[in-house]
Structures are given as structure tokens and as C-alpha cells.
Image (tube, helix red, strand yellow):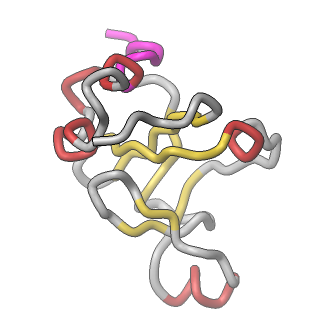
Amino acid sequence: MRRLPDDAELRFIRTVATGTVHLIITPRERATDTTPAVSIATGLTAWASGARPVITRCGAHTQPVITTRWEYVSEFDDDDLCRACYRTLAPADQHRAFEHAQAAA
């Protein structure tokens, strides 16, 4: 298993229906883009918008357009992290999946 590049940024995206939070790895210059990305959609809406799919570490396909099915998050409980996404990280990178704010109790 290969380590993540030094400039890689972990982003977190939640499946609204289940609450599971998936990992997306992006180059740092894309991750710091200030364009608001509140949520993501799938299907015809995504196709019509011309958006390219975003694939999570576990292989779930999402689309970066507004919907209620997916949402980018920066704060969540560790128990909500997708275990399959976590297992795709090299052991030396796994700690990075937990470098996020915890959801308020």
C-alpha cells in the first residue's frame, strides 16, 4: 500500500441517508479552493450540470452539485467514518483520517 503524497488533502463527505462519512483525497491546491461546495448529487442533475464524478476511497461515486444525498463535512464522530475508506490508507497515513473536529455532543 502506497503512502499519500505530501501535498494530499483529506476531505470528508457524508452520505446523508446513513450518516457514514467517506474519505476523498485531493491535491492541496484543489482542496483549498474557496468555491463553496455544500453538497453533492448523482444522476440526471449531475449529468446536466456537466460535473465530473468524485470517487471516495471505498469506491462510492458522488457528483459535486447541490442535492440532499451527500454533504461535505469537517466535523463528525469518529464512529461515523467509513471503515472501508479507512482501510485503503497506508498504516503511516491512517492517523490523518482522525484529524478533524468532533461533532458536538
Residue 77 lies in quadrant: top left
Q: Nearest the camera: 67 or 50?
A: 50
The image shows residue 64, relative to residue 28, as above or below, that is below
- Give the residues drawn in magenta, as a range: 97-105
Q: Answer with the quarter of the image where residue 2 lies.
A: top left
For image coordinates 44% across by 16% down, the residue present is: 99
Total number of numbered discs in the rendering: 0
Q: Position of residue 83 (x, y in %)?
A: 17, 39
Q: Main secondary structure of the magenta part?
A: loop
Name of the residue lying farthest toward the front: 2
Queried whether the magenta region covers residue 103, the answer comes back as yes
- Is residue 68 positioned above or below 73 on the image? below
The residue at the point 59 percent across, 46 percent down is 26
Q: Position of residue 95 (x, y in %)?
A: 34, 17
Whether the magenta-drawn stretch holds residue 38 is answered as no
Q: Nearer the viewer, residue 28 or 14?
A: 28
**In the image, what residue occupies the spot 27% across and 55% down?**
58
Q: Position of residue 64 (x, y in %)?
A: 60, 64
x, y percent for residue 71: 49, 49
Q: Is residue 72 above or below residue 65?
A: above
Examine the rendering and report whether any part of residue 90 can be seen.
yes
| Residue 19 visible in the shown view | no
* 18 left or right of 71 in image: left
Q: Residue at x 65, y 90 (%)?
A: 48
Screen quadrant of the N terminus: top left
Q: Nearer the viewer, residue 16 or 24?
A: 24
